[in-house]
Image (tube, rainbow, N blue to C red):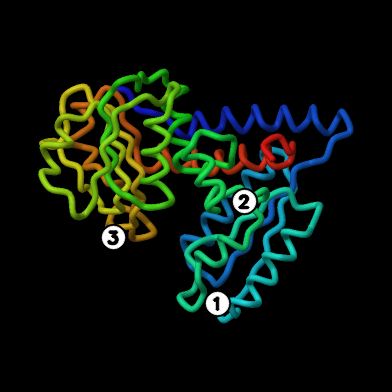
Amino acid sequence: MQLIDGKAIAAEIKKEIAKEIEEIVNAGGKTPHLAAILVGHDGGSETYVAHKVKACGECGFKSTLIRFEDDITEEELLNEVERLNNDDDVDGFIVQLPLPKHISEQRVIEAIDYKKDVDGFHPINVGRMSIGLPCFVSATPAGIIELLKRYNIDTQGKSCVVLGRSNIVGKPVATLMMQKGNPGNATVTVCHSRSENLKEICKGADIIIAALGSPEFVTADMVKDGAVIVDVGTTRVPSDKTKSGFKLTGDVKFDEVADKCSYITPVPGGVGPMTIVSLMKNTLLAGKKCIY
């Protein structure tokens, strides 16, 4: 069994980006500028945005954090989105999810200029991705593909089971795994809460990508020997072994599954760091204006 070290790969990619930015700036080019809108004080969102701002510094980007209280109206937020759409200095921006319940996340996503949509959530980017055109690919699926690529994990003709059908991870990663290319060219099955014979389907998989948000859902009896496991889950569960009183737990029961695998991502330190660095890669592309 080999651990897939997302933290190490992410650090490597950030160095590559920083080197390219240095060359761009030295040649008289513009420093890429990423803006982030944060609404309210959700603990997870605060942490994610802090990591993104830190990564911008490591890559040599300019970053701007725009905060609003959770009583902001939908129209006020949409006005801010429109302001960023029209700000020529901002190359890309994100609106950190989740948003308060009185705001339509879909309406906000669709209001973002798809040419600045570095989260890759806009329907135009999703549509272009689905037919293999250049676009901003959402960060977690892009990070998963990059991990498979950098570890030279063969996906050609392999049976890949994706657990979860979310718009942010499940659907796009399934699309990327079935597209022509390497990584890609896999035979993909997407399973979800209504799927039957789940254990039998998983046992036939060469690759399992678990993105359910259900702690330790994947157990040893669902995994065949030599499988590749990518664990996207990051659920905070109570723990008396940490100072914070909780620990991050993946969708895979790591201790009993790991010995059966050829490769497996840990939680934390697997997919998580790659999600942030994939956002940085999209920001670089936005700054270079090389997609649109």
Among the 4 quarters of the image, the one containing residue 2:
top left
**Identity, as a three-letter code, of the amino acid under mark 3:** Pro
Circle 3 is placed at which residue position?
A: 238
Residue 117 drawn at (x, y percent): 62, 51
Q: Nearer the viewer, residue 241 or 177?
A: 177
SS for callout 2: loop
Instruction: Using the image, determine if residue 254 lies above or below residue 187.
Output: below
Residue drawn at x 54%, y 67% as measured from the top left: 107
Give how far apart the Cα atoms at labels 3 and 1 are.
Answer: 27 Å
Left or right of 98? Residue 245 is: left
Residue 27 drawn at (x, y percent): 87, 28
Nearer to us of marks 2 and 3 is 2
Give how far apart the Cα atoms at labels 1 and 2 are.
Answer: 22 Å
Label 1 Cα crowd, 10 Å radius (few <14 / some 14-19 / many 20+):
some
Residues at marks 2 and 3 touching, judged by CB atoms closer than 8 Å? no
Residue drawn at x 81%, y 52% as measured from the top left: 89
Circle 1 is placed at which residue position?
A: 70
Residue drawn at x 63%, y 47% as measured from the top left: 54
Left or right of 193? Residue 236 is: right
**Identity, as a three-letter code, of the amino acid under mark 1:** Asp
SS for callout 1: loop
Upstream in sequence: badge 2 or badge 3: 2
SS for callout 3: strand
Circle 2 is placed at which residue position?
A: 117
